[in-house]
Amino acid sequence: MSEKELGQKWDHCLADSAIKFGTGLGLGIVFSVVFFKRRTWPIVFGTGLGLGMAYSNCQNDLRSHYVLHSKVAKEQ
Amino acid sequence: MAAKILPVVKFATKFTIAGGALYVAYDSGLLGDGKEGSVVLGRAKAAFPPAVEEWMKYFSFELPATPKIEFSPLDAWNSVFHSGVQKSIHALSVAPSTVSDYTKQGLQYVKDLTK
């Protein structure tokens, strides 16, 4: 993976983390207000879910360069 | 009869609101891949000024023009010349000698006080 590609992947990672953090926070607030009587734990849970999704995406993206691909030969 | 249906209606409304929020997040690609996320960010950035303008027209309220700041945190961190990375690592590398200098100065100051 070239340096430029790696830099772009890290940039995507950071942007994605920010988006998922915000989305998780927002959805956590919505769920907390609507269903859980304004407790704190849904907000924390949603934020954690968002960060976890971002981490997993990052991991997949950075590893995708090294994943082996195979083709199944057609039977003749 | 109304009293019996009310909790169901309340729950249905809550479920709709929460489900709607979840669906909007899913549909706009907020919960997708990393690349999708930056696409969404770009779209949001592009849609932000017209939306602000529309709201301003609606409320006939003039926001002061935001000054154009020519600063990009990404470039400042990544750039080739005096980047944030270089400054951070340089600070880390001179940290031990800096700390020992400050300690010596502090001890000297205390000695001078007790003379």
Image (spheres, coloured by chain):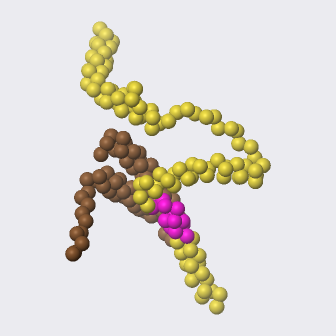
Residue at (44, 32) in percent of width and height: B76
Q: Which residue is drawn at 74% across and 43% down?
A: B62
Residue A51 visible? The answer is no
**Residue B12 coordinates in the image, percent (x, y):** 56, 79
Q: Nearer the viewer, residue B115 or A62?
A: A62
Q: Can residue A6 be seen in this view?
A: yes
The quarter of the picture where residue A21 lies is bottom left
Q: Is residue A10 left or right of residue B43?
A: left
Give the chain coloured yellow: B
Chain coloured brown in the rendered structure: A
Asked whether B21 falls inside the magenta stretch, the response is yes
Left/right of residue B23 with respect to residue B113 in the rendered view: right
Residue projecting furthest to the front: A76
The residue segment tinted magenta is B20-31
Looking at the picture, tell me which residue is in the foreground, B85 or B10.
Answer: B85
Q: Which residue lies furthest to the right in this view?
A: B60
Residue B40: percent from left, percent from top: 51, 55
In magenta stretch: residue B73 = no
Q: Quadrant of the N terminus of chain B?
A: bottom right
